[in-house]
Amino acid sequence: MSLESLIVWVIVGGIAGTIADWLVSGVRLGCLGTVVVGIIGAFVGAWLLQQLNLSIGSGLINDIVTAAIGATVLLLGIRFLRRI
């Protein structure tokens, strides 16, 4: 993995994590946590959309939207587990 790829992953993760943080209230993870949730959310979102047989498109916007969907699902799960 090149340094450029790593930087793109961090930027996409940060944007997706921030979008998910705006959508799901009550879960504050900080800056690093937001990026990590966004990166993990990319995997969750890709898996979820594949299971639902949905395709958003291609390119960077698709990556951000997919990661934001996954990060939102992930934050909803974290919020649910914190309330138990």
Image (spheres, rainbow, N blue to C red):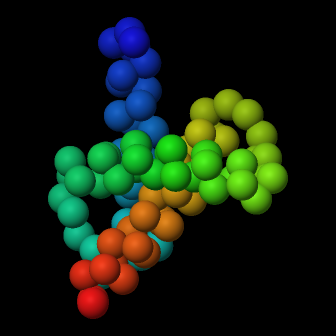
Q: Quadrant of residue 75?
A: bottom left
In the rendered image, residue 52, in percent from the top left (x then y), is placed at 76, 59
Query: In this rendering, would 79 be left or right of 76?
Result: left
Seen at 40% across and 43% down, the residue is 39
Compared with residue 43, is residue 51 higher up or lower down, i.e. above or below?
below
Q: Quadrant of the N terminus?
A: top left
Q: Is residue 77 visible?
A: yes
Camera-side residue of 73 and 60: 73
User: Residue 13, how many percent across, how many down?
Assistant: 40, 43
The image position of residue 30, as x and y in percent, is: 18, 59
Please tell me which residue is depicted at 51% across the width and 44% down the height of the picture. Answer: 43
Q: Residue at x 43, y 27 (%)?
A: 8
On screen, 45 above or below 76? above
Towards the viewer: 42 or 50: 50
Give how far across and how far down residue 71 sits, in percent: 45, 58
Residue ID at (27%, 90%): 84
Tell me: 50 left or right of 70: right
Taking the image as drawn, is residue 20 in sight? no
In this view, the residue farthest toward the bottom is 84
Quadrant hosting residue 81: bottom left
**In the rendered image of this protein, does residue 24 appear above or below residue 53?**
below
